[in-house]
Amino acid sequence: MPQLLPSRRWAPAFLLPLFSLLTAGAQAQCPATAATCTPGGAPAANYPFNMGIMNVTLSTLSNPTGGVRDGYQDYSCSLGTTLTIGQDYPLTVTTNTGADENVRVWLDLNNDGQFNPSTELLMSSSGRGNQTRTVRVPAGAVTGVALRLRIAADYVNAPVPTPCSTPQYSQTEDYRVTLQAASQPPVAAFVADQTLTCSGCVQFTDQSQNAPTSWAWTFGDGGSSSQQNPRHCYTAPGTYTVTLTATNAAGPHTVTRTNYIVYDNQVPVATSCAAPTVNFCCGYGITQLTLGSLTYNSANASAGYQDFTCNGRVSLVEGTPHNITIQTGNTNAQDTRAWLDLNNDGTFTSNELLLTALNRTSTFTSTLLIPATAVKNTPLRLRLITDFAGATVTPCGNVQFGQAEDYTVTVLPNTQPPVANFTSNYTSTCSNPVQFTDQSLNAPTSWEWDFGDGATSTQQNPVHTYTASGVYNVSLTARNAFGPNTVVKTAHVAVTVPCLTYCPSNGTTPNTWINTVTVSGGSLATPFTNVSTADGYGNFTNKVISLRQGESYTLSVASGTNFIRSTTAWIDYNRNGVFETTEIIANGQSNLFFNANFTIPGQVGVAGFTRMRVLSRLNNNVPNPCLTNQFNSETEDYSVNISPVLASREAQGRSALHVYPNPTADGLLRLSLTTAQPPATYALTVENALGAVVHRQSLRLLPGSPTELNLSALPRGLYVLRLLGADGQLLLRRVVRD
């Protein structure tokens, strides 16, 4: 170095002015004001994580750099760009591609050497690789001088960078930005925080480019404002057009958004309670609802209770099932319930619980049926609550991991006649009384039930007790203002009165089981067939086989395997609840298919409702209908309804009993004995074509003098009159009710 001193001391005089110009020119490119703080560099121990700023691109500036090992770098005197105030520019900061980093960018807008953490923040981003945002320099910034741009990055789990902090894993870089005033008129633009408002108040935000200096708003209701970002409250419901004129020194520009704001103040009655989330966990909650025409996305339970009654609206027709699809926030099983405030009183009661979907995962679909009791054409509050499977949930209680969300449902009146339908709790011949439940669609307002035994009801969900053994058709006629609709379920109920308790019989089925039971021939125009699976015991007493005395039939029993097996079947002819040896109708060995013929006895007392038992087993032991846990065997029970042979039975009483008019149009019959018969009191039962008893009474008959019998309550059809005298005499006649 000493040898350089003479060179510098004796430099030629003509070089001194040039040196001075270069020095002054370089200094002129630096920011006008020095920064009041200088960040440090990350510790060398964190270099191996390879974080840092790899590239910066803004307008004409593009600078690839080396990352964290470069430490803090001040490029402000050598690298920069020029921006126009009020214009949008993409700013890209490239960080490492292996880990997320927080990126913050500030510009010293007032040229005071400091960075205000909020008002001078141009960009905030988190991610990896290229992180791009659109930036706009606001009006009022210093123009014509170099300003300092500071870019800071650090690992996402480290403290968020501040203008003067030293990063732990990444770095900070400074650049130069020179601002110039806009030379073009503004490009007016704006947005609202909500375009559908239920309160009437809307926050408008100016998004005009080219740095306007004044603003003129009109809100479509006669209101106006000169603020940049005004808040306006509408006083009357309606649809409004909003206009903004933005102006700067170069001129004005106007934008109009037609029918932009809708003010609808028709919302449900305020709820008397919320259902807050108290312990959010694990992504529980509702993330999407689809109901009718409404699809609404939302945050999970991290957002807690949400009231979407303003923007989440849907109209549903009463009495019609509507698909509802709910997406939850994780794959854990959750319980979901929905209440609708049917009477619009702000509370939720047990009868307003319309959906219970338990132990469902992720996305599931169910149906929502709006009852006719709902208030019509009025916004009603729908509350959805989801929580972990097994949680105790009430419409107003705390929600543990999940959340509650409220929506608006407007119930529209039905304009179609009902579609009649019903269910019952009938399961076997001992299901008596039977609970019937209306399932009709399109909001019926009245109901007419016929239980098949002569009894009726006008209740919506009646309970009926059958007093006689038999098989019964059940019909329901549902009505509303638009008409009636009827459904008939044939042989819907088969009961034994009194209920007989038969001995249990079951087995295990590793190598054989009953696959199909078929009864064909005789009076059966269509064979009876039942297909089953291996259960050890099958209770099919809700399935009825209709047979007739004196007719011959074929019983076929198919096995699930081809082993040699024994098959036995009984019919409890005397209806005493015991399967006796004399009641065996089939017994034999076969492999895959077993077939046997049997004939229904013609004796008096056989006709009626009873039970058939079928037993299949891999042994040739003496058949026993009452063994339990029998290895390699299966038992199935069926109901059998045995009808009398009408012609022969009628002949017994034809000469002794006179019935007229027959057919009868009004159901009013006259019965009398022939003159050869003494007066007597008879026990009368009336059976339908299926053998079910539909009417009972005592009847006093006289020779030559008619006694009236009123069957007007019975529907049209074929009936059998059975009159049993005290001496055991049985009189039978067939009548037709037109």
Image: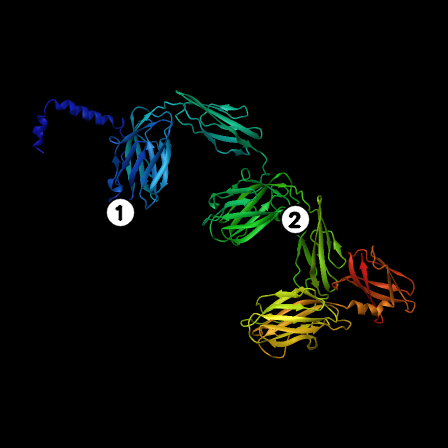
The quarter in which the C terminus is drawn is bottom right
Horizontal side, residue 58 vs residue 673: left or right: left
Residue position marked by numbered label 2 in the rendering? 441
Label 1 sits on a secondary structure element that is helix
- Residue 333 is situated, as x and y percent measured from the top left of the image, at 50, 53
Q: Which residue is drawn at 9% across and 31% down?
A: 4
Residue in the image at 22% along x and 27% along y? 26
Residue 85 higher or lower than 365, as above or below? above
Residue 170 sits in quarter: top left
Viewer-nearest residue: 727 or 563? 563
- Tell me if label 1 and label 2 are in contact, CB under 8 Å: no
Instruction: Tell me the crowding category of disc 1: few under 14, some 14 to 19, or many 20 or more residues within 10 angstroms, Cα based.
Output: few
Q: Is residue 491 left or right of residue 334?
A: right
Q: What residue type is labelled 2?
A: Leu
Q: Position of residue 209 (x, y in %)?
A: 40, 27
Task: Indicate the quadrant where residue 91 lies.
Answer: top left
Q: Which tag, 1 or 2, sits closer to the chain's start?
A: 1
Q: Is mark 2 on a helix, strand or loop?
A: loop
Image coordinates of residue 500 in percent, x first then y, are 70, 68
In the foreground, 35 or 253:
253
In this view, 543 is above or below 227: below
Is residue 587 in view? yes
Viewer-proximal residue among 611 and 328: 611
529 left or right, relative to 679: left
Is 80 displayed left or right of 499 in the figure? left
Residue topped by disc 1: 48
Q: Disc 1 marks which amino acid? A: Pro
Please state, as top left, top right, bottom left or bottom right, where the N terminus lies in the image: top left
